[in-house]
Amino acid sequence: MRTTVLIVAAGSGSRLQAGIPKAMVTLGDGHTMLEHCLDSVVAARDAGAIELNAIAVVVPGDPDYAASLGEVCHAFAARTAVTVQTVPGGAERADSVRAGLAAVRKLAGPAGPAGSAGSAGGPFGRHALLVHDAARPFVPPAVFSAVVTALESGTAAVVPAVEVVDTIKTVAGAAPEVVTGTLQRTQLRAVQTPQGFDLTSLEAAHRLAEEGAGGAAALTDDAMAMEAAGHRVGVVAGDPLGFKITTQLDLMMANALLASGTSTNLEHH
């Protein structure tokens, strides 16, 4: 199934406190998070997990940061012969994804007539879109494969996820907060990326979400837009290596993995 990957790399990384966008942060081996994330996509392609069409990268709106990440993408494209296009992001994550969707549609080709077999990918049939966080640089090929396999079975949306090991409680009130309930963790999952979608279905879901009362700020991931549009969202097994680098502790763990060689995607091509 032809697949375009949309990497969201426009986040400011305020919680990481690095002073630069998170995707530009250099890990212990001297390569940025975005470089590692791009390499994980190529590793999935080389392993036969995805039939890679192209990659779109949503970069910060700041022209200096955009230019810096653009250089990373240009070097990656030259090194791997993968088509990579950058596009400036928006104020909210959903705004950035919508900007990326426009670029993805150009890379994927026009949609076919409504209701036709090719309605998600023009003459090539259904087109898979994987929306991926640049801050998850070590996702193994098996996760990409599981997501695409689920899309090939006919589902319109699928997310990789891992079981929740902590006890999760709901709280209310100002400090000190009080516990109002305890959730059954057997029914909870921590969702990762790449999240997979039928391209045309996600485009329509985002249009509906943009028109809704919550607007862009209400969406923390793209599966939420699909849920709101009435689609069932499938779940496949994620991987502990799919963790998101958000805090300094996460960054320490990423560098420890690099130093130990634990990650399957450490090899910089």
Image: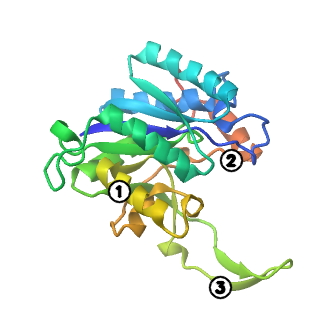
Q: Amino acid at mark 3?
A: Gly
Mark 3, residue position:
181
Q: Marks 2/1: CA distance?
A: 30 Å
Mark 2, residue position:
246
Q: Which mark is residue 237?
A: none
256 left or right of 183 in image: right
- Comes first in the chain, label 2 or label 1: 1
**Quadrant in the picture for the N terminus:** top left
Q: Label 1 neighbourhood size at 10 Å, few (<14), some (14-19), many (20+)?
A: some
Badge 3 marks a residue whose secondary structure is strand
Name which quarter of the figure residue 248 lies in: top right
The residue mark sitting in front, 1 or 3, is 1
Mark 1, residue position:
204
Q: Amino acid at mark 1?
A: Ala
Q: Amino acid at mark 2?
A: Thr
76 left or right of 62 in image: left
Which residue is drawn at the image coordinates 64% and 22% (left, top)? 68
- Residue 132 visible in the picture: yes
